[in-house]
Image (spheres, rainbow, N blue to C red):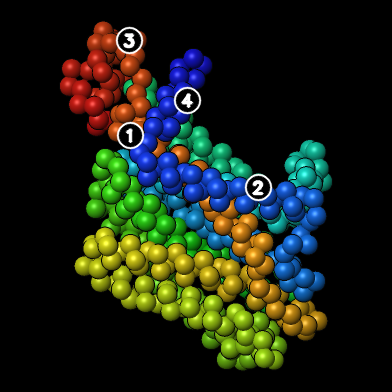
Amino acid sequence: MTLLIKFAIDSIVYILKGSVKFYAWLALLGFLSLIYFFGLYQQLVHGLIFTNFNDQVSWGLYESNFIFLVGVAAAAVTVVFPAYVYHHKQLKSIVVLGEMVAITAVTMVILFILLHLGRADRLWHIIPGIGIFNFPNSMLTWDVLVLNVYLGLNVICAFYYLYKKYTHQPLNDKFYLPVVYISIVWALSIHTVTAFLINTMPARPMWFHSMMPIKFISTAFASGPALIIIAFLIIKRTTALKIEDEAIELLAQIATWCLGIALFLAMSEIVTELYPSTEHSFSLKYLLFGKHGLSKLVPWIWSSFTLNIVAFLLLLNPNFRKNHNKLLIACVMIFVGVWIEKGMGLVVPAYIPTPIGEFSEYTPSLFEIMNAIGAWALGLMMFTILAKGAIGVLLGEISYDSEAVKKSDCDKEPLVCHSFCPGHPSSTGKEK
């Protein structure tokens, strides 16, 4: 326990050291984060009166970010899976950063759910054993379960690995690898269950089809790797951590082909809905072309299509993917394009028209936008702190100078001694 406390203290001390730019970045995020807490307080006292939700449209910007971020969290498996199943060396050395993305994304999901609740003090109703959890009848309880378990699995994997690296001890593969493999399978479950949460609503024809889970997974495996690539490129340029080009190239390929699948599924959905053109296609018609003079969402969805199609065509060129400056632009296009598609192109139009045919448009209020910015600022601050601590351990700058790990210990148990052990005769400071 003493060693664990020292690990925490050393990590905090290292994280608090930084340049002026680092502190300026955290100060900006901290200021924006205050907006979130102010908005949460207002909604705790007054409810959702500050939003533009109405009787017809009860889901909006908060739920859009929730669904999008579940995909980002699930997409961390695109780093973990190649690293541990296919033993991709370049990704395995930095896999913990992908797990930090997952931890941050799930935490942000919780932040947006708190905003959606309005009265966050009533959250205890979905706690098993305390409130009325209604498991397994309610699909929402399944989502609560899989998201929290996935968060726990990634916390265990990431911090267990960093702790062992810090103390120069070998990983206990009998414990560590099963947790990793379970997290890989669980990653698919979180976005699948989120898809089930909405596609089991027959009153919303735009959601009510079996293609929704695979559509969620494909868009998640496009936008998630895009965000991870952006993070990796920034880390590569601003820190001493070496991220191999092969790792970024693999993630770029995954994002490219999954984006292609997502675009194909979108085309299939449009043809299926519009060719027979029944009353069930009203939501999609409203989204694509407007209806009854209402067309606020039309520019959003066509902007999303444009960004995703252009990014896909550009990324088909291997030379484009290998140029990191150009790749960064394409990844931003994917990230924004999928974010729009998951929000303004999926969540909101499913409520327009209502099951009884009412048309009522929705536009996020300034209050909602500021709360969303605050939640993203909190997430970025969390990832910045987690990533810096992880990078410090990976670089060996956060390390336990243990006198308990001596050459004599290596002589006693040479088979379990890692090459980065300080007492090892062939120590290079890096794990083989």
Query: Quick one: 30 or 160, which is closer to the camera?
Result: 30
Q: Position of residue 186 (x, y in %)?
A: 53, 48
Determine whether, in the image, residue 309 is placed left or right of residue 279: left
Q: Mark 3 or mark 1: which comes first in sequence?
A: 1
Instruction: Please report the residue visible at 67 percent of the width from the left and 86 percent of the height from the top.
Output: 294
Instruction: Please report the residue visible at 72 percent of the width from the left and 64 percent of the height from the top.
Output: 51
Which disc number belongs to residue 8? 4
Q: Mark 4 or mark 1: which comes first in sequence?
A: 4
* Callout 1: SS: helix
Circle nearer the viewer, 4 or 3: 4
Q: Mark 3 or mark 2: which comes first in sequence?
A: 2
* Callout 4: SS: helix
Three-letter code for the amino acid on which mark 1 is drawn: Leu
Determine whether, in the image, residue 96 is placed left or right of residue 427: right
Residue 36 visible in this rendered orientation of the protein:
yes
| Above or below 359: residue 105 | above
Three-letter code for the amino acid on which mark 4 is drawn: Ala
Q: Quadrant of the C terminus?
A: top left
- Within-10-Å neighbours for mark 3: few <14, some 14–19, many 20+: few
Q: Position of residue 144 (x, y in %)?
A: 67, 49
- Within-10-Å neighbours for mark 1: few <14, some 14–19, many 20+: many
Q: Position of residue 282 (x, y in %)?
A: 67, 86
The residue to which callout 1 is attached is: 394
Q: Residue at the top extreme?
A: 408
Q: CA distance from mark 4 to mark 3?
A: 19 Å
* Callout 2: SS: helix
The residue to which callout 3 is attached is: 403
Q: CA distance from mark 3 to mark 1?
A: 21 Å
Q: Position of residue 122 (x, y in %)?
A: 79, 46
Instruction: Please report the residue visible at 53 percent of the width from the left and 78 percent of the height from the top.
Output: 301
| Above or below 5: residue 185 | below
